[in-house]
Every structure is written in structure tokens, then in C-alpha cells.
Image (cartoon, grey):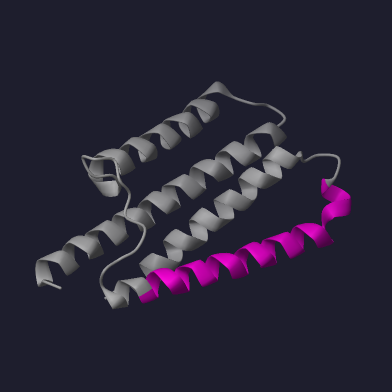
Amino acid sequence: MKQQDIKTEEKFMNHNAWFSIFMGVTLLIISGYPMLNHTSVPLLFLGSAAFLGSFFMFVIRGGFTWKLSYRLTYKDEYLNTIDTIAYKHVVLALLFSMGTVYLCSDSLALQVSHSMMATFYLAVMSLVYGISILWQSRD
């Protein structure tokens, strides 16, 4: 692989990590919004703007090529290793969060819906993936 291709893939991986973090924060806002007693329009607007902003940033800045085909793997072996380890961190975080929710389920059952919990799990997975990639690829 050429050095230029490696730099391009590193930039793409960094972009995906930041996208995952922004998406995780947005999903946390969306999952916690129904639990607020005094819901506010600015918070809903902030969550919607963060979601749309991160989505358009991803589409415009490198997630998709002109043919709208998404690259699922990296050609560089080191970047593939970082990606694989990040997915392992995601699985561990998901198991930990599901176990914690299971242990605290008596107090959560009346306040939290299934869609809120699904959104929360997606937020945990997105945040852990992005943070894991940024942590592993720091220099």
C-alpha cells in the first residue's frame, strides 16, 4: 500500500470515530429527552441539529464516495486491527450496560420504554466505538 493511501485511510478512520462520538451524544440526548419533566424546545432543537449535522458531515466529508458505496474494511492491517479491537470494546460495553440495566430494572421499568433503552444501547455502542478508535490511534 502507498503511504498516501494509508494517510487517506487514517483520515477516514478518524472521521468515522468523531462521527460515532457525535452520533452517540445525539442518541443519548434523544433517549433521555422523554424522561425530562419540563421538556424544552431548545433541547429538542439541539438534538435534532446535532443529529442532522453529524449525518451531513459524515455524508459530505468522506463516509460515502461518489458512487455511494461504503467501505467496510481497511486495506492497512494496522487499521484493521484497531477497528477489530474497537468492535471488541463495543461488545464488552454493550454486555456491561445490559447487565447494569438488568440489575437496576426494578426501578427503571415504569419510567423507561423499550425504544428509549434501544436508543440508549445504540448510543453506548457508538460512543465506545468512537472513543476506542480515538484512544488507540493517538500518537
- At x 81%, y 39%, the residue is 111
Count of labels shown?
0
Question: Taking 1 as reference, is 40 above or below it?
Answer: above
Q: Which residues are magenta?
A: 81-108
Q: Is residue 10 left or right of residue 103?
A: left
Instruction: Return the residue found at the far right.
Output: 106
| Quadrant placement of the N terminus | bottom left
Residue 31, given in percent of the width and then of the height, sits at 63, 40
| Quadrant placement of the C terminus | bottom left
Which secondary structure is most common in the magenta stretch? helix
Residue 20, given in percent of the width and then of the height, sits at 43, 52
Can I make out residue 81 in this image? yes
- At x 63%, y 34%, the residue is 33
Question: Taking 124 as reference, is 91 above or below it?
Answer: below
Q: Nearer the viewer, residue 99 or 2?
A: 2
Residue 24, given in percent of the width and then of the height, sits at 50, 49
Question: Taking 122 as reference, is 35 above or below it?
Answer: above
Q: Is residue 42 left or right of residue 92?
A: left
Residue 73, given in percent of the width and then of the height, sits at 34, 63
Residue 110 is covered by the magenta coloring: no
